[in-house]
């Protein structure tokens, strides 16, 4: 396999997966690093990815690996005192989101760039009717009258398939089920036809049958609107269902990324392989599950080299001290590991 | 259910628990007439719905709350007939692992105190014997004896779950009830805890009752499975049978809804439509009828009873005999592709080799 080095600097860098002609680049994040106050290293370290029109990138990884911080940094929603962006840029419509003024940011957010969170209850205001909240989101960015904004809200309720939409407009958030609230959130996010949608665990809090409905709805709406989507999840099943591209994150770095089929059929990074093999499946059980020993380290415990070294079954001395470069091949599949493909490790003498 | 040859450890009969819903004077039917029996040594899973009925069944099984009606029979005795002393003794044998180990572990107690506490209550061990035993228990669940000096907040989620399991084991239980025992954990850590529970089950001859929403976890761990919908059991069957050929339309829908980690897969079936009805006002007849793709007139009027439908299987559906439902299809059950599978296997060998080497 021919492997080309895209980042010679030696930082663990994510790739730039420009959708192969499928859609224009909408957001290009490069070398994003974030450091929290009082932390010894950048928690988010050199993250790069590209979102293209009409395509979905899934950011996947375990709790605490930095998925939300990455997306919040891109939307400029991190508390500025506690979280400093130490490097990188996030190009959206030819402007660097990381360097826009507050005023400019607020004009983009909720308009051309929208976000959906895991728990809609925290993003919907409990004391206002849901229809008014969606109308308000429209009015904030469009010169429209009350009537028009409300009509737009109704239209959006129809598009997200809320039954009896006219009546639902006048409901308060608590009168709706979790699935319906998430539909309202989607309606609100899409009300201004964003070019970019960031969804952070949008279905995690929902029953599986409702999750399936919401995922299907999101796919349909994306097909219609051609928006680029960043979907954050820890569920590899959701990834397989909805992603075009996948970026696997571990301890603040993207360790592997590529087209979804490639990631599932040809996983290279030991963390990706560990994640996939530790999942129980619906097939007949086959004894003990594989595990990843230990748990995700805190930034104080990150080894200076590969951050997975403290848990990786293949780690060598070098892994602890030297950061493996992120290398990407012609198929847009990239990863950062000194020892891949792991087959060669076994051939070179197997485990101790 | 009254088969004398079966060795039943814990059994419920028509268990009901209703809650009145704040102010509205209406009733939430969290558990609504549940009868099940758990055999000694098996892992019995209950597929829990998200939303209503939260943990109610688990709490009823341990008599942490009182049923509105019905009974829980443990080792042949009705729990509600026990004196407080007898109840304490029974509770020692019936232990609990919660979803969130943090909320169940007193943050001001050291791990040693937490794990040692049941030993004071349930054994006559001396102080130093207890310390030794705590060390053994911690090591048994994959922690170190020195961890006894530390506090829960110093541990990761997975480690806290290990502490909770060590504490549960201290009173030498016969039954371990896990209420979403791994759902708060990351997959990698979840796998560690699942393996641990299975090991302990065989080492200590435990009976496991696992209440969970994740069908893959349930498939992996359990011998028999009960599926609940709106507070009622709609199907109860051996795990293989249930997953290969579900007997109830809701079970089929659940299986179909699970996102499977294999890209490019054909959409299997229609997504189940409709929202989950409010538990305040469950639908008439079959409670699943507003969402059931097979519903007929009768379903809206007449409530189907849980009836025998083949070997060890109970199903509550009027059309059970005529329907042939889709289970975990061959395509879904089959592993990933060859290359990926080979790497999974290599990974497993190395991970286990290292664990053995460093243990
Ligand atoms: N305000 C903050 N101050 C210090 N550390 C923070 C702050 N916010 C987040 N972190 C840390 O940043 C890391 C990444 O957190 P993040 O929320 O992005 O994880 P995640 O991948 O979204 O996890 P989850 O799946 O649990 O949502 C974690 O170690 C977290 O503790
Ligand atoms: S082999 Fe080394 S570089 Fe590769 S993932 Fe493991 S620790 Fe990191
Ligand atoms: S009884 Fe009718 S509505 Fe209920 S599950 Fe069976 S077919 Fe569906
Ligand atoms: Mg998050």
Image: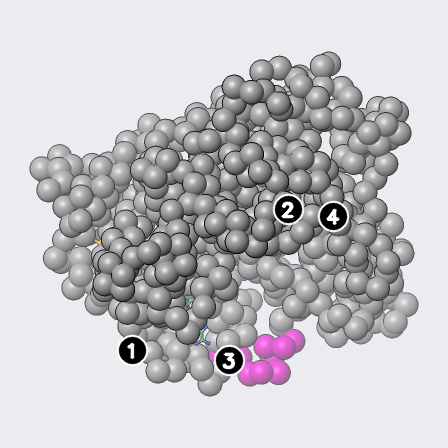
Query: Residue A77 appears at what percent x and percent y?
Result: 54, 74
| Residue A128 vertical placement versus A55 (above, below) | below
Query: Residue A145 appears at what percent x and percent y?
Result: 87, 72
Report, in whole angstroms, how far the alpha carbon at label 2 lies from the one at label 1: 57 Å
Cβ atoms under marks 2 and 4 closer than 8 Å: no
| Label 3 within 8 A of ligand 1 by Cβ | yes
Q: Are marks 3 and 4 on the same chain?
A: no
Was residue B49 drawn as part of the magenta stretch in this picture? no
The disc at residue B316 is none
Query: Residue B1 appears at what percent x and percent y?
Result: 62, 24
> Quadrant of the image for the N terminus of chain A?
top left
Q: Are marks 4 and 1 on the same chain?
A: no
The disc at residue B80 is 2
Label 4 element class: loop
B241, A51: nearer the viewer? B241
Q: Which residue is mark 1?
A: A40
Q: Which residue is mark 3?
A: A79
- Disc 1: CA contacts within 10 A as few (<14), some (14-19) or many (>=20): few
Q: Is residue A211 left or right of residue A239?
A: right
- Disc 4: CA contacts within 10 A as few (<14), some (14-19) or many (>=20): some
Q: Are marks 1 and 3 on the same chain?
A: yes
Task: Give the mark toward the camera: 4 or 1.
Answer: 4
Cβ atoms under marks 3 and 2 closer than 8 Å: no
Extent of the magenta region: A99-107
Label 1 element class: loop
* Mark nearer the N terminus (1 vs 3): 1
Task: Give the mark toward the camera: 3 or 2.
Answer: 2
């Amino acid at each position: 396999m021919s492997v080309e080095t895209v980042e010679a600097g030696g930082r663990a860098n994510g790739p730039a997966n420009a959708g192969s002609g499928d859609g224009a680049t909408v957001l290009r994040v490069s070398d994003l690093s974030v450091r929290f106050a009082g932390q010894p290293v950048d928690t988010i370290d050199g993250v790069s990815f590209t979102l293209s029109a009409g395509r979905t990138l899934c950011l996947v990884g375990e709790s605490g690996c930095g998925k939300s911080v990455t997306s919040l940094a891109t939307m400029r929603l991190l508390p500025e005192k506690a979280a400093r962006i130490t490097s990188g840029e996030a190009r959206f419509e030819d402007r660097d989101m990381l360097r826009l003024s507050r005023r400019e940011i607020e004009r983009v957010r909720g308009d051309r760039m929208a976000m959906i969170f895991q728990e809609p209850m925290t993003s919907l205001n409990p004391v206002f009717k849901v229809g008014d909240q969606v109308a308000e989101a429209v009015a904030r960015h469009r010169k429209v009258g009350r009537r028009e904004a409300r009509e737009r809200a109704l239209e959006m309720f129809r598009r997200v398939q809320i039954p009896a939409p006219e009546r639902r407009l006048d409901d308060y958030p608590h009168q709706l089920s979790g699935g319906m609230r998430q539909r309202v959130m989607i309606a609100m996010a899409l009300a201004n036809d964003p070019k970019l949608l960031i969804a952070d665990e949008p279905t995690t809090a929902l029953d599986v049958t409702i999750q399936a409905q919401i995922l299907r709805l999101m796919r349909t709406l994306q097909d219609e609107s051609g928006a680029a989507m960043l979907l954050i999840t820890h569920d590899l099943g959701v990834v397989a269902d909805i992603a075009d591209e996948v970026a696997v994150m571990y301890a603040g770095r993207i360790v592997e990324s590529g087209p979804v089929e490639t990631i599932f059929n040809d996983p290279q990074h030991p963390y990706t392989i560990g994640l996939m093999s530790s999942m129980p499946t619906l097939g007949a059980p086959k004894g003990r599950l594989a595990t990843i020993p230990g748990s995700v380290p805190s930034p104080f415990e990150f080894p200076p080299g590969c951050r997975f070294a403290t848990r990786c079954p293949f780690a060598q001395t070098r892994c602890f001290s030297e950061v493996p470069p992120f290398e990407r091949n012609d198929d847009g599949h990239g990863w950062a590991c000194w020892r891949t493909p792991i087959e060669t490790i076994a051939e070179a003498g197997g485990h101790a | 259910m009254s088969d004398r040859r079966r060795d039943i450890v814990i059994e419920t009969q028509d268990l009901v628990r209703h809650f009145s819903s704040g102010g509205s004077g209406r009733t939430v039917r969290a558990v609504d007439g549940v009868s099940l029996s758990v055999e000694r040594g098996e892992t019995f899973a209950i597929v829990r719905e998200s939303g209503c009925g939260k943990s109610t069944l688990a709490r009823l099984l341990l008599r942490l709350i009182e049923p509105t009606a019905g009974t829980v029979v443990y080792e042949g005795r009705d729990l509600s007939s026990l004196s407080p002393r007898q109840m304490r003794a029974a509770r020692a044998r019936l232990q609990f692992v919660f979803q969130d180990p943090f909320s169940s572990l007193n943050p001001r107690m050291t791990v040693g105190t937490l794990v040692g506490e049941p030993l004071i209550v349930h054994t006559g061990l001396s102080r130093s014997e207890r310390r030794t035993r705590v060390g053994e228990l911690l090591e048994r669940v994959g922690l170190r004896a020195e961890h006894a000096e530390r506090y829960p907040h110093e541990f990761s989620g997975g480690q806290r779950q290990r502490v909770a399991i060590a504490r549960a084991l201290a009173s030498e239980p016969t039954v371990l009830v896990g209420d979403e025992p791994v759902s708060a954990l990351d997959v990698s850590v979840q796998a560690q805890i699942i393996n641990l529970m299975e090991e302990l089950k065989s080492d200590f001859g435990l009976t496991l009752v696992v209440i969970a929403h994740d069908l893959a976890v349930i498939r992996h761990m359990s011998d028999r499975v009960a599926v609940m919908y709106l507070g009622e059991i709609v199907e109860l069957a051996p795990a293989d049978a249930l997953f290969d050929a579900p007997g109830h339309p809701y079970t089929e829908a659940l299986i179909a809804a699970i996102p499977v980690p294999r890209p490019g897969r054909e959409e299997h079936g229609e997504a189940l439509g409709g929202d989950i009805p409010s538990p305040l006002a469950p639908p008439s007849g079959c409670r699943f009828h507003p969402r059931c793709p097979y519903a007929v007139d009768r379903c809206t009027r007449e409530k189907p009873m849980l009836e025998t439908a083949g070997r060890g299987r109970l199903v509550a559906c009027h059309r059970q005999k005529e329907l042939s439902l889709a289970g975990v299809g061959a395509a879904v059950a089959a592993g990933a592709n060859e290359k990926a599978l080979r790497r999974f296997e290599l990974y497993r060998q190395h991970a286990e080799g290292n664990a053995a080497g460093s243990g």
